[in-house]
Amino acid sequence: MDKIAVLDFGGQYAHLIANRVRRLNVYSEILDPETKAEDLKDYKGIIFSGGPESVYDANSPKADDAILNLGVPILGICYGHQLLAHMQGAEVKHEPDSREYGLAEVEVKKAEGLFAGLDSKEQVWMSHGDSVMELPPGYEVIGSTRSGEWAALANFEKNFYGTQFHLEVTHTEHGMKMLENFLDLCQVKREWSIEKFIEEEIEVVKKKVQDKKVFMLVSGGVDSTVAFVLLDKALGSDRVYGLFVDTGLLRKNERQQVEESLKGAGFENLHVADASEMYFQALNGIYDPEAKRKIIGDLFLKVQANVSEELGLNPDDWLLGQGTIYPDTIESGGTRHAAVIKTHHNRVARIEELLKQGKLIEPLAQLYKDEVRAVGEKLGLSKSLVWRHPFPGPGLGVRCLCAQEEKYPHNHTLLENKINEELKEKGLQAYILPIQSVGVQGDFRTYRNPLVIHGDVSFDEMDAIATDVINRNDELNRVLWMCYPSKIEEMNVQKVFMTRERVELLQEADAVVNDFIVEKGLLQDIWQFPTVLIPLSINREFGEAIVLRPVQSTEAMTASFYKMNMDLVSELTERLMKVEGITGVFYDVTNKPPGTIEWE
Ligand code: XMP
């Protein structure tokens, strides 16, 4: 099959490139950036991805120079664009004035090759600190932005192209058209499909598992269920054993629902282990989100080892199966040059060890959620299972914030005053919350405070305010809108960790939210709806608060907050305020980036 290589220099969107190419029905593989030219001979085209580093750093990843002589088209994106120019002698510099983050406009100078059929002005998406400062020999400028004369370059004779902007993200309006043009230049056949993936993956699984069996960790979610069915199809039911761990961090009544739905889908070899006590004990006194994730991930393996011992299974005969998908790996820093955003439960150190020993099988590891769903549908799973909202493996464990101090020093009074001054004319009030949450900014992980705003503004206005205020203030990574109360007189941080009582409180609130979106017919409009419990009591001495985090996304690497009808927000808030122990409700109006979807 004809294929395209994507050299992964560690950018958060590197895998999106391969995903987009495959959507255009061309098979595409992600390869190590230092892959030798002779190993790239069978590819019809090569794409250099973005990455967090600078080409002139001694340790930054470089590509083999001989790639330039392979005679195939090359496309460089962001870091890849700078590298391609740098490899051909052009200067690349860190120019504070030419930094660009977010939307930009490109003036198309030549609507040919990569830019064939484009308008004279195109909306694109930028995220870079370095810039190409001159034209490499044999190149022409095909597009410029206000602060980047060399933003898009072409060597028409060799079919080499570079764009400073990210054409793989949906915010670049005609990014898919550009990619399509590149594939035309590569003269590649459009032969890849989901059916083909299933066919080939079944062969890969058979080859990898050989005469062994697979012990599969299932959560009842889309990814692990689809992986389970695929393994079942490849190996037969008697060689795939499912383990569902009740961590105590599931949604209300979820254990019963998952058991019923998996059994309903025909899985016979399913073992359910109640390990909730073990989880609550291990998480007692733990505050740090990364530490919590690692504990949760390690315990899955411990429970699996205990169960396999109970069942008298010989570890040498079994591989461990997981429903890991690509964003789990990339955000855990799982590719060579990517920064750690957060360690997903299925990427803890012991799992990495199994991976190295060849004892782990993850048939969906290269796919994004949208592709996993397509595989699930093709394999005949019910629509209600395939279209369930994604639910993270660590469950409510990543939605229940803990606090290690009772009183937090409020370090941000000056900033709070400054923002209040700026927002005064809009009639808005701002507060900085004395807690922190995880975000992702410029290919890196951040741990910062949220800003709360209150007042009569539309979600569209809040969207603009949130983007602006976070871009300008390094101390912040999220903005929330205050649904209840209408004024904060006092905030008390509770010194609390993960306990059964707190998780039960969150389960109640989460069930209110889920029932509400089903009742109002919003399930399909929203991609995922985390309900987050924060240890903050508002205008009362004790109690907690809820953050609503509905988002729209296609593959979880980027997301926009969902703009619910305001009357519905009020109705939902009213219902949540009836849950005993809840003292306030906030609505997260942050996109990803800069905020992640989950709070931890
Ligand atoms: P973030 O919070 O990183 O989430 O924007 C992206 C997607 O991944 C899910 N998620 C996880 N899934 N184990 C999982 O199986 C994890 O540790 C984990 N952390 C986040 C999250 O729910 C969202 O869909």
Image (tube, rainbow, N blue to C red):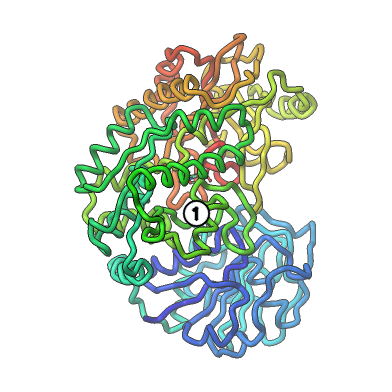
Where is residue 369 drawn, in percent x and y?
40, 53
**In the structure shown, which secondary structural element does the residue marked by tag 1 occupy?**
helix
Q: Which residue shows up at 67% across the image and 43% down it?
A: 446
Residue 517 image point, x, y percent? 35, 30
Q: Vertically, is 500 above or below 180?
A: above
Where on the picture, by quarter, is residue 56? Answer: bottom right
In this picture, is 102 found above or below 236?
above
- In what quadrant of the picture does the C terminus appear? top right
Image check: 387 left or right of 595?
Answer: left
The image shows residue 319 at horizontal and vertical percentages of 39, 59
The answer to whether 243 appears left or right of 181 in the picture is: left
Badge 1 amino acid:
Pro
Q: Based on the displayed image, in which of its 4 quarters is residue 470 positioned?
A: top right
Q: Is residue 313 left or right of residue 537?
A: left
Q: Residue at x 55, y 18 (%)?
A: 544
User: Is residue 107 in view from this perspective?
Assistant: no
Residue 13, above or below 599: below
Mark 1 crowdedness (10 Å alpha carbons): few <14, some 14-19, many ≥20 = many
> Which quadrant would the N terminus be assigned to in this image?
bottom left
**Residue assigned mark 1:** 327
The foreground one among 80 and 181 is 80
Residue behind label 1 places its C-beta within 8 angstroms of ligand 1: yes
Question: Where residue 183 appears, x then y in whole percent?
Answer: 45, 77
553 or 259, which is in the foreground?
259
Q: Is residue 560 above or below residue 30?
A: above
For the point 75% across and 82% down, which residue is it? 89
Q: Nearer the viewer, residue 54 or 494?
A: 494
Numbered marks: total? 1
Q: Which residue is found at the position 60% from the left and 15% from the top?
A: 538
Q: Is there any visible trace of residue 93 in the rendered image? A: yes
